[in-house]
Image (tube, grey):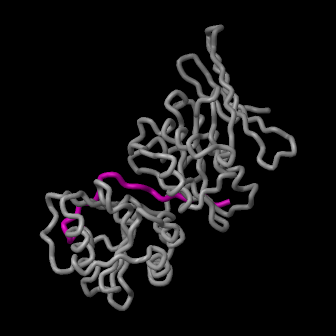
Amino acid sequence: MSPLNRYEGAGVSESWTLLQSTGCDPVPNRVLVAAMHGPSSHAASWRLTSRVVAECTSEEVTAAIVHCFQGYLVPMRLTSDKYETRFRAENLDPFASRVYYDNGAPAAIVMIARRGWTSRLAAMAIAPDFRGRGLGKEVMRVALEEAVKRKDRSMILEVIEQNQAAVSLYTKLGFQPIRRLVGYELNPDAARERDADYARLREFDPLIVARLIAKEGEPDLPWMLMPETLAASTPPVQALHLDELAYAIVADPSAERIVIRALLVRKEHRKHGWGSRMVRALEAVFAGRPLAVSVLVPENLAPGLFLKAGWQEQTLKQFEMKIEF
């Protein structure tokens, strides 16, 4: 075994070593060993083990995600039910995703989704006690090595632009930014009075809307906006249509903050104001509550639609990044 990474500072160095079991188990166990070396004879050492998500319960994985995302730029609020709903839609591969443990306590989480020849880093986080030690680099190297072994052609991810440490990590690993993603929001104080269109909104099957997006939507959408993701939507997700010319998918109509996950206008009716009419109708239906479009929209995709309607671009931005093998 040989060190994969070395961290040095203040007279102390830390090296990580990866071990892998050599038994017949098709999902080999991973062990990361870290030893702290310094002037003191009482230097600490760690031995991290990992389990694939397929071997964990939903409750265990949820607890690990929440623990590892403590202090993150965007708070992670997750229950086991929400975990199952979210990651099922994203095509999580439970055999490619791992939880790393230190004496039974979560130290890192790596969640991998897969479609065809492409993997996506759906989530990666390091527990507070293990940050700044190079562990993020090592668990990512494991994920990349495993992607190559299963013959994936590429891996993609989204990272908050303002999270410079994460952007630097992924860049050093070989990921390249391919586009910038933005989001929009509307304060309830800015919502308009109800107009005639809101009463014409009707509920629709999200699966049918996803099929329409596959047929008439923009090509090469980010993973979370792809028809494949939207097609897995189940209640409380709600789809609405306006005269079957404009469509919207809302994450949860009962939530305190309404998140619009998708918006589509039929091709032959674009540039006739139907997108704006749908936005105004949604503002009216959910009057009094803040509305948002998550930071997943390519910045060149209809940027004027929400801004002209009085919405604000969200402060946080994301980079979509990609590495090819």
Indicate whether 322 appears above or below 243. above
Q: Which residue is depicted at the point 69% across and 55% down?
A: 147
How far from the left and from the top, in percent, is residue 285?
Answer: 23, 69
Residue shown at the point (22%, 78%) measured from the top left: 199
The residue depicted at 55 percent of the width and 29 percent of the height is 130
Q: Report the quarter where the N terminus lies.
A: top right
Q: Front-most of 134 and 209?
A: 209
Q: In the figure, residue 100 lies in which quadrant?
A: top right
> What range is drawn magenta here?
307-325
Instruction: Describe residue 13's horizontal placement relative to residue 160 as left or right.
Output: right
Residue at the top extreme of this rendering:
41
Q: Nearer the viewer, residue 199 or 49?
A: 199
Looking at the picture, does residue 129 appear above or below residue 83? above
Depth check: 208 or 1 in front? 208
| Number of numbered markers | 0
Q: Identify the image quadrant of residue 312.
A: bottom left
221 lies left or right of 266: right
66 part of magenta stretch: no
Where is residue 215 drawn, in percent x and y?
A: 49, 83
Q: Position of residue 186 (x, y in %)?
A: 23, 60
- Locate the C terminus by quadrant: bottom right
Position of residue 271 measured from the top left corner of the image (x, y, whole percent): 29, 86
Q: Residue at x 21, y 73 (%)?
A: 280
